[in-house]
Amino acid sequence: MAIKGSVISDKNAKNIDDKTLYVQQGDNLEGIRVVFKEKHAYSIDDAVEINIYNTTLSKANGELALTDVPNEQAKKIDLEKIAPQITSLAYLEANKDKLDGSLVTINAGMLISSTNNLNGDILLKDISGDIEVDIKTDASFAKVEAPKDFIDLTGILRVIDGKMSIAPRNLADFNALQFVTDDFTTWEFPNVHLSGLQSELFTSIANWYGDRRYGAIKQLADKNDANFTQANKLYPYIPTDSMYSSLGVNNNNKLSLKGVKVIKVTFAGSQAIGYTEFSEISRTDGLIRVNVLPFTTNVDEIKVGLALPISTEGEKDEWGLTTPFGQNKNYLIAASEAYKENGKFFTATFLIPTTLEDIRALGIESENASQWFENPIIEIINLSSRKTSGISTSRDDRHIPILIDKVEFGF
C-alpha cells in the first residue's frame, strides 16, 4: 500500500529538518507530515510515491504523520504540483481539521515580529484574527527584516492540539501587496447630467461619488486649512458625520476593485471655524453649510470608518427597523483610531473582506453579501465626533469636517 502526492515543503530553505517533508495528495486536501529515517533528497514540487509498509501512520497532537519511513520505500513519480488554497483566517479556523498540513495562502495580513526580523515571536494578523508564524532559528530567511507593509503569506498550515500556525517554506512565500494610489491631483469633469442626489467626483484613477446634500464634495482647501494643504489642489471634503456623508468609490473600467484587500485613507480634520460653506466646484447647487465650533485638542476626535454597501433581503437592523428589499444598506466594517488633533494628516489602514467567511465574521448576515465581491462598492465615512462637554449628538454644530489627501488600494 502506498500514498502519492506532491511535496509542498522546502528542505533547502531549512524551515524544516532534512529528514522531514510535507506531502499533499490534491488541492485543498489535508497534507501529511512524512519523517524518513535518513536525510531525503526531495525538493519542493517533486511528486513522490511512498510505500507505507513497516511505517507508522498516526495523528500526533492532531497532526497526521507518517514516521519511521525507510528512504528506499519512496520514489519520484509524475503528478501536477499543488496550488495553495487562497483563504483567510476565518475560513481556516472553520475548516482547520480538513486543511491541516496543506498548502495555504492567507490574504492580506501584517506581520508583527518581536525582533523586527523573520525570527522570534511572529504573528500574522488579518481581518478576522491572528496566527502564529512558525520560522525556525536556522531557517535561511530567519534573519531577514520582516516586511513592514501588507503581504499575502503562503505556507503549510499546522494544527497542533487545535491551535493553528503557518510555516512559510522560503522567502518567496512572503508576497508584498501592490498598491494603486489616488492622490486627487487629476480630476475629470465628465459632460454628463448629474441628476438626483449623487455628486460624481471622477479622477483619472477612479470614479468617486458623494451626496450633494451631505458630501463628499471637491473644492480648494478652506482658507483655514492652508497651512497644511497644497495650494491649487482640489480636496474631497466630508463636512458632516451623517452616514450619508461619505466618499464612495465603485467598481469601474478605470479601477477594478475586485480583489482589493487593503485600503489606506490619509485624512485630516479641517481647521475651518464658524459658519462655513463647503462648495462643490463643478456645481452651482452643491453647497453645504456647517456651523463649525472650535476644535478642542486632546478632547474632540477625528475618525473615519469604512462601509460596504450591500444589497439587503429586507432583514431588520439592530434597532428592529427594516431596510427595503434589494436596497443597498451601508455596513460599517471598521473604524480608524480616534485622533485628537486637527489640521494634520493621519493615515488609517483598513483590511477588506476577501471571503464570505470574512463577511460573516463581521456580523453581516445578508444573503446577498457574496455578490459584493463581484461588484465591490466602498464608502469612507466621517465618524469624527465632539467630546467637548455640552455638545450633544443632536446639535447641528456637532460636526467636524474632514478632508481626504489620498487613498491607496492594495491588491
Image (spheres, rainbow, N blue to C red):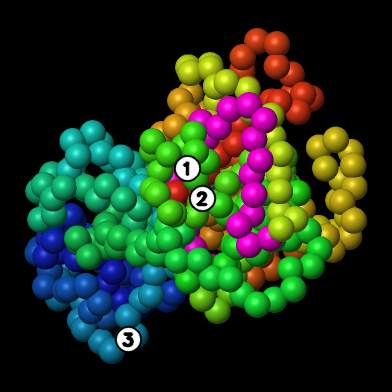
Q: Per the image, is 274 magenta?
A: yes
Q: Amino acid at mark 1?
A: Phe
**Residue to which mark 1 is pinned:** 267
Residue 11 x, y percent position in the rendering:
15, 64
What residue would you read off at disc 3?
Answer: 79
Whole-percent x, y for residue 115 in the image: 18, 36
Query: How far apart are the two marked residues, 2 and 1, measured between alpha carbons?
Result: 15 Å
Give coordinates of residue 208: x percent, y percent: 59, 62
The magenta-colored residue range is 257-283
- Residue type pointed to by label 2: Leu
Residue under pointer 2 = 220
Q: How many marks?
A: 3
- Which residue is more in the foreground, 106 or 346? 346
* Image quadrant occupied by the C terminus: bottom left
Mark earlier in primary sequence (1, 3): 3
In the image, which is nearer the foreground, mark 2 or mark 3? Answer: 2
- Mark pair 2, 3: CA separation: 61 Å
Q: In the image, 182: left or right of 95?
A: left
Q: Residue at x 23, y 79 (%)?
A: 46
